[in-house]
Image (cartoon, grey):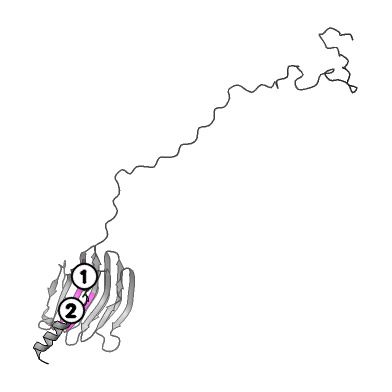
Amino acid sequence: MSKKRTAALGAGILSALVAGGVAFAPAAAATPEDSAYALAADGLVNITKVPHVVGEGKDHLVHTELPPGAKSILRAGVFNSAVEEGYAKASTTDAELGLPGLPAISVGLVTAECDDLTGATSVADLKIGGQHIALDQIAPNTEIIPEQLKGLARITLNKQTDNGDGSLTVSALSVDLLNGTQTVDLSTATCTDKPEAPENPENPEKPEEPTAPEKPEEPTTPPSEDDGDDDGDKGGDLPGSKPDQDGKAPTPVPQPGHLDVTG
């Protein structure tokens, strides 16, 4: 089939799909995530990201050889990765990288940290072929090519990449062998921007405190002991105040200070 006929056939199929209401949705853009890993390699030797933490959490590996066995290209004492929202950190201690045809590259401690889209790294005790490499403050994307590696490989320290999706990736130490034939990244952290903290009012109004209910006023004059009777008996029955058993009037009883009453 000729190229013209193939192109015409392809155009015809595309027109038919559009006319039939088939829509081609654009690929959804991936949401950036905070992540960290201590080691990754790509090329002749592939090593997946380890220990790889995405979103939130921590992980580590101790006394590791990767790949395992006689063909390992990296030995390390400890790998660490830690991630939380807007922050990521990865570190590698006592690492030795031995790529085929290159002098050994060793480092005491290499750390990458990404915090709210700001990257920072530290590299301590870097040696290439047993020769110590003096490092001071490491600017972003600092490239070094020691004499032992000329024409073979280059090392990038504090490698920072704006991913274009609202995230930043920082690799503390990146080795590129023969223009990408083999790459190795030590201590890599990716972070997004942190969410803004809620604003606090300068003088928040305090809620009104409840007031205690008022107590009723107590009477100032004590209640009278008099029950309202006017007979002066103070609640008791005086002699002669009630009829006898036959219902007859009681016999008057003389009282002191009163005249005798006769019947």
Query: What residue occupies the far top of the structure in this picture?
Result: 259
Residue 32 figure quarter: bottom left
Q: For the residue labelled by badge 1, is the local secondary structure a helix, a strand or a loop?
A: strand
Residue 78 figure quarter: bottom left
Which disc number belongs to residue 175? Answer: 2
Which residues lie in the magenta part? Answer: 164-186
Q: Tell me if residue 26 is in the magenta stretch.
A: no
If the image is split into quadrants, where does the N terminus sit? bottom left
> Residue 67: horizontal and vertical position, in percent?
28, 85
> Residue 134: horizontal and vertical position, in percent?
15, 72
What secondary structure prevails in the magenta region? strand
The disc labelled 1 sits on which kind of residue? Thr
Q: Tell me if residue 183 is in the magenta stretch.
A: yes
The disc labelled 2 sits on which kind of residue? Val
Q: Tell me which residue sits at (13%, 74%) in the image.
A: 143
Looking at the image, which is closer to me, 46 or 137? 46
Q: In this figure, which residue is indicated by the disc labeled 1?
A: 169
Q: Tell me which residue sits at (31%, 81%) in the image.
A: 64
**60 vs 257: above or below:** below
Measured Cα–Cα span from mark 2 to mark 1? 16 Å
Looking at the image, which is closer to me, 195 or 5? 5
If the image is split into quadrants, where does the C terminus sit? top right
Q: For the residue labelled by badge 2, is the local secondary structure a helix, a strand or a loop?
A: strand
